Amino acid sequence: MDLELTSASNPRVKELAGLRRRRSRDDAGLTLVEGHEELVLALDAGVRPRTLYYSPALVRPDQLGTVRRVAGLGAEVVRLSRQVFAKVAYRQSPDGWLAVVPAVAGNLEHLVLGERPLVLVCEGIEKPGNLGAILRTADAAGVTAVIAAGPVTDWGNPNLVRASNGTVFSVPVAAGGSAEVLGWLAERSVPVVATTPDTDTLVAEADLTGPVAIAVGSEHDGLSGPWLERAATRVKIPMFGRVDSLNVAASAAVVVYEAVRQRMRRP
């Protein structure tokens, strides 16, 4: 019989709420996955939850097979009343699924690049929603890895997990200081292509068919000096309207898919 929690004052409810804070996640080595779709993608990527919390009053009957699937992995399964689930959920309209899973690995040395990697580097991006959207693009485009340079948020941020639709578990990710990441790429002979409006080279004019690390910068300041100085190539997206820049997630998608287009033409 599954454990059932019906009181919002239960200590476990407070522990779950605490995992919304980065320090608590770092200390525990855990993070949260909310939502059935996100949980299934994480499971398909090999994630083994520690605990599954679900609310029978909220979940769809056709999704209950996921409870058995998670239990079969050895995870603890806990039922929550609708009221208790509302206390632990961070979505406005929760669907009744919340899992505690191991923290997302973020070590550069764990990344395997292969012969012709397409790496996406995100420097100083602040908004979890933007990083999550970038991960969805990376998953769809088959990007080798996404690296957060000078990270402001962590890969286990629940809002990032949600915005990525769970793809943070399907795309290899890592994090490190900018100097560390630049050195790591140089050691592996992966040239950097820096995105910036301060260049005459359009992205379609650059050769993105070989090993490459596409670098995008923060929402307000763009890439910092070290990335621009050490880039093999600087590229820009053509702009014909009144605004002079795109959202960083949109910019990353444009440049990544230009690389995909070129690689499809030159396999």
Image: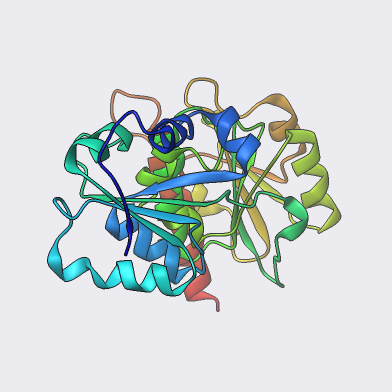
What percent of the width, then of the height, locates residue 124? 59, 29
Judge left or right: residue 192 versus residue 17: right
Q: Nearer the viewer, residue 5 or 250?
A: 5
Q: Is residue 202 visible?
A: no
Q: Is residue 75 above or below residue 82?
A: below
Name the residue at the top extreme: 220
Q: Quadrant of the C terminus?
A: bottom right
Name the residue at the front extreme: 1
Q: Residue at x 48, y 68 (%)?
A: 45
Q: Residue at x 66, y 26 (%)?
A: 224
Task: Report which quarter residue 247 is drawn in.
Answer: top left
Q: Nearer the viewer, residue 156 or 102?
A: 102
Q: Residue at x 43, y 33 (%)?
A: 11
Q: Is residue 150 above or below residue 46?
A: above
Q: Nearer the viewer, residue 142 or 256?
A: 142
What percent of the width, then of the height, locates residue 240? 31, 33
Q: Is residue 246 above or below residue 79?
A: above
What percent of the width, then of the height, locates residue 223? 61, 29
Judge left or right: residue 108 versus residue 91: right
Q: Nearer the viewer, residue 48 or 235?
A: 48
